Image (spheres, grey):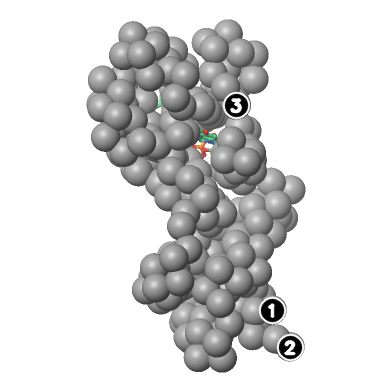
Amino acid sequence: MSVLLQINEMLQKGRAKNVEELVNQAINEGIPAQSILNDGLISAMMVVGQKFKENKIYVPEVLIAARAMNAAVAVLQPELVKQGVKPVGKAIVCTVKGDLHDIGKNLVKMMLEGVGIECVDLGVDVDGDAIVEAVKETGANVVCLSALLTTTMTAQKDVIDALKEAGVRNSVKVMVGGAPVTQSFADSIGADAYAVDAASAAEIALTFFK
Ligand code: B1M
C-alpha cells in the first residue's frame, strides 16, 4: 500500500503517532507536500466528515481524527512553506454574543482546517464590532457564526447588520449554523449559507473559494 493511502487510513482512525511517522516518511520519499496534504490528509478528513454526517461515527471520533490531522499538519507545515503551498482561503469562526457554547464551533473550525482553510478563531461571546475588526485586519473571505441558544441566534443577524454598517458585507460570505438555526432562518437574516453540521460547513466554505 502506498504511503499516502496509509496516511489516509491511519488519519481516519485518528492514529496521530502513526500519521506523523508516515508524513515524515512521505517527505523523505520526496512526495510533494501539496500531494501529502490533499491526497493523504484532506481526503481522509473528507471521509471522516461524510461518515459523521451519516451518523456512522460520532463527535469523539471526529475530534480524535482532527487532533491527528493537526499533528500531521504541524509536521508538514515547514515543507508546505518551503514549497510555497498556500491555504485555500481564510475564514473567521466564532460563537456569537451571549453564547458560550463552543464544541460545535470547534468542530466547524477543525473540519474547515481539515480541507485546507486557514481559520481565525475569535472564540465565544463575540459581538459584531469584533468580527468587523477581524474581517478588516485578517482579510478573511468567510465568516462562520455559531449559535446554540434560541436567545442568541438573533445575534447572527446583528453581525450581518454590523458588517453592512461597516461597509464590508460584500467582501465576505457569511455562513450560519448551530442547533436552533435553520435554512429559513438563515435566509430571513440574509446569510449567504446555512450548514447543518461541521462537515457540510467545510464543503460549503470550499465552494466560496472556487
Ligand atoms: Co447549554 N444549552 N446552556 N451548555 N447545552 C443547550 C444548547 C440546550 C439545548 C440544552 C437543553 O436545554 N436541552 C439549551 C438551549 C435551549 C434553547 O435555547 N433552545 C441550553 C441552555 C439553556 C444553556 C444555558 C442557558 C443553561 C443555563 O445556564 N441555564 C447556558 C447558556 C450559557 C451561555 O451560552 N450563555 C448553557 C451552558 C452550557 C454549558 C456551559 C454547561 C455547556 C457548554 C460547554 C461548551 O460548549 N464548552 C452546555 C452544553 C454542553 C449544552 C449541550 C448539552 C450540548 C451542546 C453541544 O456541545 N453539542 C446542549 C444540549 C444538546 O445539544 N443536546 C445545550 C454538541 C455539538 C457538536 O453540537 O454545538 O449543535 P452543536 O454543533 C453541531 C451543529 O449545530 C453544527 O455543527 C455541529 C455538528 O457537526 N454547527 C454548525 C454548530 N455551529 C455551526 C456553525 C456552522 C455550521 C454548523 O457554520 C458557521
Q: Are marks 1 and 2 in contact (CB under 8 Å)?
A: yes
Label 1 amino acid? Leu
Residue at 59% x, 25% y: name it. Answer: 193
3 or 2: tag closer to the N-terminus: 2
Q: Is mark 1 within 8 Å of ligand 1?
A: no
Mark sitting on residue 194: 3
Q: Are marks 3 and 2 in contact (CB under 8 Å)?
A: no
Residue at 58% x, 82% y: name it. Answer: 31
Mark sitting on residue 84: none
How far apart in space, not on screen, are marks 1 and 2 (Cα)? 6 Å
Q: Quadrant where the C terminus lies?
A: top right
Q: Is residue 2 visible?
A: yes
Residue 18 point in image, percent of width and height: 52, 84
SS at circle 1: helix
Disc 2 designates what residue? 1
Rendering quarter of residue 169: top left
Q: Is mark 2 within 8 Å of ligand 1?
A: no
Label 2 amino acid? Met
Does residue 117 appear left or right of residue 51 in this picture? left
SS at circle 2: loop
Disc 1 designates what residue? 5
